[in-house]
Image (spheres, rainbow, N blue to C red):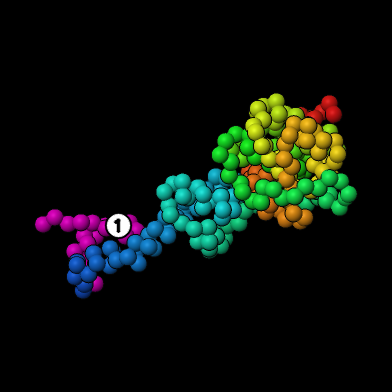
Amino acid sequence: MKYKFIKNNESVFPIEKMCQILQLSSSSYYKWKNRPSGKRLLLKGKIKQQITSIYFSSKQRYGSPRITFELNSLGYKISRITVAKYMKELGLRSKLSKKFKVTTNSKHNYLVAENVLDRHFIAEKPAQVWVSDITYIQTKEGFLYLTTVIDLYDRKIIGWSLSKGMNTGETSLAAWKMAFKNRKIGESLIFHSDRGVQYASRKFANTLEFYGITRSMSRRGNCWDNVVAESFFKSLKTELIYGNKLISKEKNGVGNF
């Protein structure tokens, strides 16, 4: 008689023998093994293993949104809410920044523009919509300011600037010049940003006007109006900055500023 075996710690028993000892029929055992609730528990355990693996592979920096994305890429159909629930059960939580520095000053009388973009974050062709923002990066000697310009068509960083100061020439204008050099401007280009003085200054506004570009700005205190730029900075800091040792400004490439 051919037996199927099952391991129990260090012992190995034929399934039929085990069922006999427990006074169960083998059909009952297979029915239990294949029941939906049993499969769901096995799947949940497997997903939790994947979550744990992704979490530590990212050096404990990924939260539920990024882990959900990775799981979906692996073929698991699971929502962010469920991933967050499993992470809570596992006691896993992404590393968060404990420091905050304001980079946007919208209390001014400079040239503010309407929110023309209106959260339409999809572009059908290159150089149709560019979004820009400024964030800070902490170093051993203090803060640096990173300005980026992203083309919504392919979500590429086409212009950027890393500076010690926050004036227009060092930030928004410097990043714009790189973007202008790297990608040809299309017709009816929209340039979207927050209401910071670096974007609302006459110097920057006149530059965009000279090239016939439509300026667009987020509503006051509404980060969702520029969520693509905000999301990039969050991913950058979570994956490459938070939890790492601070480096000097020279290693950041601004030693000659």
Residue at x 79% of width, y 39% of height? 145
- Which quarter of the figure has residue 163? top right
**Helix, strand or loop at mark 1:** strand
Residue at x 80% of width, y 30% of height? 254
Answer with left or right where residue 177 lies relative to residue 36: right
Q: Position of residue 224 (x, y in %)?
A: 67, 54
Quadrant assignment for the C terminus: top right
Observer-nearest of 164 and 110: 110
Answer with left or right where residue 139 lies relative to residue 95: right
Q: Position of residue 72 (x, y in %)?
A: 46, 50
Observer-nearest of 26 and 208: 208
Furthest residue in direction bottom, as rendered: 23
Residue at x 58% of width, y 41% of height? 123
Q: How many numbered discs, if any? A: 1
Residue kind at label 1, given as amino acid type:
Lys
State the residue position of label 1. 7
Quadrant assignment for the N terminus: bottom left
Observer-nearest of 213 and 154: 213
Residue at x 60% of width, y 34% of height? 126
Furthest residue in direction left, as rendered: 1
81 up-or-down from 103: above or below: below
Answer with left or right where residue 62 lies relative to residue 218: left
Crowding at dot 1, Cα within 10 Å, few <14 / some 14-19 / many 20+, comes out as few
13 up-or-down from 109: above or below: below
- Asked whether residue 234 appears in the rendered view, the answer is no
Q: Position of residue 23 (x, y in %)?
A: 21, 74
Observer-nearest of 58 and 208: 208
- Asked whether residue 123 appears in the rendered view, the answer is yes
Magenta residues, start to end: 1-22
> Is residue 164 highlighted in magenta?
no
Q: Position of residue 255 (x, y in %)?
A: 82, 28
